[in-house]
Image (cartoon, rainbow, N blue to C red):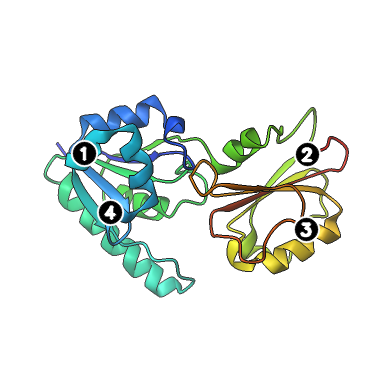
Amino acid sequence: MTGILYGTGVGPGDPELMTLKAVRLVKENEVIALPGADPKATVAYQIALQAVPELAEKTLVAVDMPMTHNKEEMNRKHDAAAALVEEYLKKGQNVVFLTLGDPTIYSTYVYVQKRVAAHGYPTELVSGITSFCAAAARTNTPLVEWDEQLHVLPAVHRLENRLEAPGNYVLMKSGRKMSQVKEILAASGKEVVMVENCGMESEHVYRSVEEIPDDAGYYSLIIAKEPHGGL
C-alpha cells in the first residue's frame, strides 16, 4: 500500500480560516510538505502553525518551487518535487502538501500532483478558502449578485485584458505589474477595492485605484465591480 498525497489549502492568511479537514490532516499525518527552500519560513507554515501547534514537531519536507517564467526550469523543479514526495508515498506514508488559499486556484501544487498521479500514486485535493472570497468578506462586499458574471484573471499574465466583458473581475497576482494594472482599472470605469496580504498582520485595504500603491506586494487581490452597487 502506498501513501496518499493530499493537496491541502490553508486559506489566505488568517489561521481561523483553515478548514477543520485541513487541521485534522495536519494532526493525523507525520509528513508535511511545504513550498519553499526553508519550510518554516513559508507563509503556509506560518499560517498553519497558528492553527495546529503540533505542526512544529512534524517531519517537514522542503519543496523548492521558485517563481519563474522559464518553462524548462519549472518542469525540472516540478519533476524533482514529485520525485521527493514519492519517496515518502512509496514507503506507505501520506504526505500533506500545504498550499495558500485553495489548491485548485492557480496553485503550483497541481503540477506536482499531476506528475505523482501519472506515476500511479493516489492523490486528493482538500479545499481551502480562496483569497478572493476572503478579500470580498474582509471588505464586506458581495462578489456577484443575481445574474452577474465573475471573471477571475491572473493579472500578471493577462495585461492585454481591458476588462471589457460584462460582469465583475478578480485580479490575482497583480503586485509585480501594479502600475500597468492600475492603468487598466482606471480605464475600465469599474469600482475597485484591493486587499494586500489578506488576513495577515500586514494586511492593508485600498478602496480606489488612486489609493493603490505602485509597489504593492505579491499577495495583492483586486476586486473590480460594475459601478452600480458601491464598494
In the image, what residue type sits under mark 1?
Asn
Q: CA distance from mark 4 to mark 1?
A: 18 Å
Q: CA distance from mark 2 to mark 1?
A: 44 Å
Of callouts 3 and 2, the N-terminal one: 3
In the image, what residue type sits under mark 3?
Glu
Identified at 35% across, 49% down, the residue is 113
Most distant residue in the top direction:
20
In the image, what residue type sits under mark 4?
Pro
Identified at 60% across, 42% down, the residue is 132
Dot 1 falls on a residue whose secondary structure is loop
Marking on residue 39: 4
Q: Determine whether 36 is above or below 6 in the image.
A: below
Of callouts 4 and 3, the N-terminal one: 4
Residue nearest the viewer, comparing 105 with 72: 105
Residue nearest the viewer, comparing 188 with 206: 206
Q: Quadrant of the C terminus?
A: top right
Of callouts 3 and 1, the N-terminal one: 1
Residue denoted by label 3: 210
Residue nearest the viewer, comparing 118 with 67: 67
Q: CA distance from mark 3 to mark 1?
A: 48 Å
Most distant residue in the front direction:
201
In the image, what residue type sits under mark 2?
Leu
Residue denoted by label 1: 94
Residue denoted by label 2: 231
